[in-house]
Amino acid sequence: MQVNIIMQKENENTLASAISTCLSKNAKKAYFFVGNFKESGYKIIEEDLIDIKTKLFFVIGIDKKTTTRGMLEGLLNYTSDVYFYSNNNLNEFVSNICVFEYSDRAEVFVSGSNISESGIQSDLSLYTKIVYDLKDSNDKKEYKAQIKELQKILDEDGFNKLDIETIEKLVQDKEIFSTRQYNHSVMSISELLGKKDKKEEVEKEDNSNSEDVYKNDVEIPKIDLSDISIDIDIPEETVERKPKEDIDIDYEEEEITLPKDIESYEEELPQDTDEIDKNNELYDESMKDDNIKLDETLDINDMLFSKADVKLNVEPEKPKKKKTKKTIDDEENIVKVKKVNLNNISNLIFEVSSKNAKEDDAVKIPNHIRTMIPEFFGLDDAQTEEINGTAYKVKHINLEVVDAKTNEKYNDNEAMITYKPRQSYLTFVSSVLSNIMYDEDDIVRIIKLSETEYHMEIISKKLKEYKVWSKLCNQTFRTSTKKYGVM
């Protein structure tokens, strides 16, 4: 058995990196006995829980201040062996022990910190690493005795197994915090039109007995929607119909025009052969004469490479089959594009979360997108800078932001892309973002014009072109239901 005392200081020798290393080596079993398990710490660890075969075992403390419904539901996505103790009572469960068991050894980490973003990364902290050699009979015997002793804690009063029904009860009893606790009784569009959703009626009946429901009796005026159309027409000439015996659909690729000043934006999609079919090129020399100015809002039709549903993986072509009328109608609403080279991505499109009042100058992007298209962000060569006492990877950029709803355009020559090591997201930071209001699931489109020039467009759900851009968001983020796409 080996015992080491390690100092965590300023993001060096962090407990987070030790946990990540152990999980990446596919331990057979992992045990977490954590009294204060905060969501910020869970998000850091979660990235390493995805697609591993390790059998996970969690014993955690919960409280109404820091424990969220989302974190508990997330844990149940990875294992059913989750046990909890309520720290809302006088006596609390205090522990921070992580155990990783392999076939030939076991590594145990004992820390006095919480499992939080600062506790396992930036705080000045001492933790102990103990290594058992399981090939040695004495070490193996002692390790098994220690694990048995740790598991005995579940026999104490107050520890219970977690499941979905228990989470609902914890929310109702206000043992944990939930953003879903409060509902606003605002009329839906269907109600304004005289139709009532049966599901909503049931929910209202259920919520009528709850003290947590906020009732709003404000009268909402009826709206005449007869003159509003949200359909987006696709020209018929883009579809070539064949006789019914052998129906196939082939889309003509559209040409796009680009401004002279952003030639660096021109990217060619990879071809499967060495020769490029001239008919499939995105633009030609004649387009350089087009009169487009950078100070104008970008036209959505100009920026579309083709009518396309971007897919990262393109399967080999299969023998053509006869298609029914229903199949044809479905395909007319789907747009396709060639296989995308992830090294040449210049467009990132994604559904954004609602604006955070505390960080109204920031747009966050999950970290796994950075690892998927690293050249788009270019943070590998970014400088390390200290922000509020914490080390960040920082790339200084020029950012142009367009609010498509108001057609307002803002320029920021001091914008940044920031990323903190082991953080679950990276951030576009710009003071001009505080001038733009956006809602949940509005679409943000980021275009990389050069290594230091970026264009960002905020597309509201209320706009007609939102339907087009939402079709391009056909991939789902790992840690949420929101979607994204790349071009």
Image: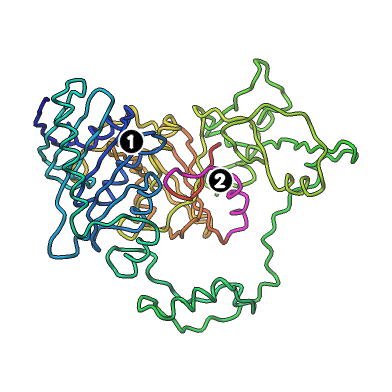
Q: Position of residue 156 (x, y in %)?
A: 18, 55
Quarter of the rendering containing residue 160: bottom left
In the rendered structure, does residue 254 fall within the stretch colored magenta?
A: no
Q: Nearer the viewer, residue 184 or 278?
A: 184
**Which residue does the image show at 54% across and 27% down from the upper left?**
341
| Magenta part of the chain | 463-479
Q: Nearer the viewer, residue 421 or 447?
A: 421
Mark number, residue 395: 1
In the rendered structure, does residue 474 fall within the stretch colored magenta?
A: yes
Q: Position of residue 195 (x, y in %)?
A: 64, 76
Q: Is residue 34 left or right of residue 247?
A: left
Q: Is residue 277 left or right of residue 465?
A: right
Q: Nearer the viewer, residue 325 or 77?
A: 77
**Which residue does the image show at 60% across and 38% down from the upper left?**
310
| Secondary element at image label 2 | loop
Q: Amino acid at mark 1?
A: Lys
Mark number, residue 473: 2
Q: Amino acid at mark 2?
A: Cys
Q: Position of residue 422 (x, y in %)?
A: 28, 37
Cα separation between marks 1 and 2: 26 Å
Q: Is residue 425 left or right of residue 306?
A: left
Q: Position of residue 402 (x, y in %)?
A: 49, 51
